[in-house]
Amino acid sequence: MTIGPFKIALIETGDFKLDGGAMFGVVPKMLWNRVAPADEQNRIAMTARALLIETDDRRILVDAGIGHKDDQKFQDLFAVDFTRHTLKDSLAARGIKADQITDVIYTHLHFDHAGGSTRREGKETVPTFPNARHFVQRKQYEHALTRSERDRASYLDANYEPVRRAGLMEFLDGDTGLLPGLKLLVSHGHTPGLQTVKIWDGDTVLWYPADLIPMSAHIPLPYTMGYDLYPMVTLEDKKRLLPQAADEKWMLVFEHDRDFPAGRVIVNEKGQFSRSDSIDIAS
């Protein structure tokens, strides 16, 4: 898909599972299980879907999936599965090598978003994209260092500290226009300093909301995650952004929805926000 000067593609990095109750917060299982069926351990099938944005001289990757550094215990806990996709293979399918990525946008530093930005090289952990600037909100990075007991397990220093030590990390403060027609919009509900990605030209808008709306099932206003540190902030951000997304027919890319990569927000017959039919970003 092309929007203005940007050529856009979805990059599948691998699959995993998280607890369904945690993914849907106060929504009863009898409701969320209809749209995201749980396995015998109450986990739901998810994916880690990155976004590739290309211009004449830039190759920008938004998030990088889980990566391959973690031990078997970690992989079993989250049912990490690379049989369908890997980050390396998905980029190679588009003719891109890791050293050709010029920019990485971290929506935030949780392991399922930042893990693939570093890799093992012998006994060392090094940046996967050695020629890329890595953009993160300063508030998110500071939170990643001080993390609370509630979200400590989501942050692994090996996923981003090698990037900082290599001098490749750049800190942002608030909403940022990275390029004309590409803006990072900040939300503090899921975690402090999460940044979503909005791309537009005169006719079309694509929005990558990351964990503000991780799956299409999270479009309805009450469907927020138990993982959100500030769920009422998440709710207010959805109430602020979803009306505009529906009115202007934004295309949304859902980072964690395995079966519904992209679609639009509509208002259904009950006056509630819902999803449209699926959209093929590749077309």
Image: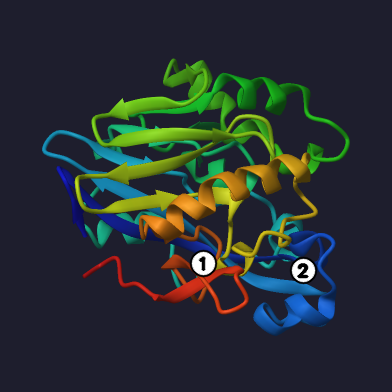
In this view, the residue farthest toward the right is 149
Judge from the rendering whether residue 132 lies leftward or rightward of residue 283; answer left or right: right
Residue 43 x %, y %: 76, 72
Res 82 label: 1
Res 20 label: 2
* Residue 33 placement: quadrant: bottom right
Spatial distance from mark 2 to mark 1, Cα to Cα? 21 Å
Judge from the rendering whether residue 148 lies leftward or rightward of residue 76; answer left or right: right
Q: Is residue 183 above or below residue 154?
A: above
Nearest to N terminus: mark 2 or mark 1: 2
Residue 164 x %, y %: 52, 20
The amino acid type, in three-letter code, at marker 2 is Gly
Q: Residue at x 21, y 45 (%)?
A: 201
The reply to whether residue 67 is in sight is no
User: Under tag 2, what secondary structure?
Assistant: helix
Residue 151 x %, y %: 80, 40
Q: Residues within 10 Å of mark 1 (few under 14, many from 20)?
A: some
Q: Residue at x 71, y 82 (%)?
A: 37
Q: How is the image coloured?
A: rainbow
Q: Residue at x 25, y 53 (%)?
A: 204
Judge from the rendering whether residue 180 lies leftward or rightward of residue 233; answer left or right: left
> What is the number of callouts on the image?
2
The amino acid type, in three-letter code, at marker 1 is Phe
Q: Residue at x 42, y 68 (%)?
A: 263
Relative depth, front residue between 22 and 183: 183
| Quadrant in which the C terminus is drawn | bottom left
Judge from the rendering whether residue 162 lies leftward or rightward of residue 45; answer left or right: left
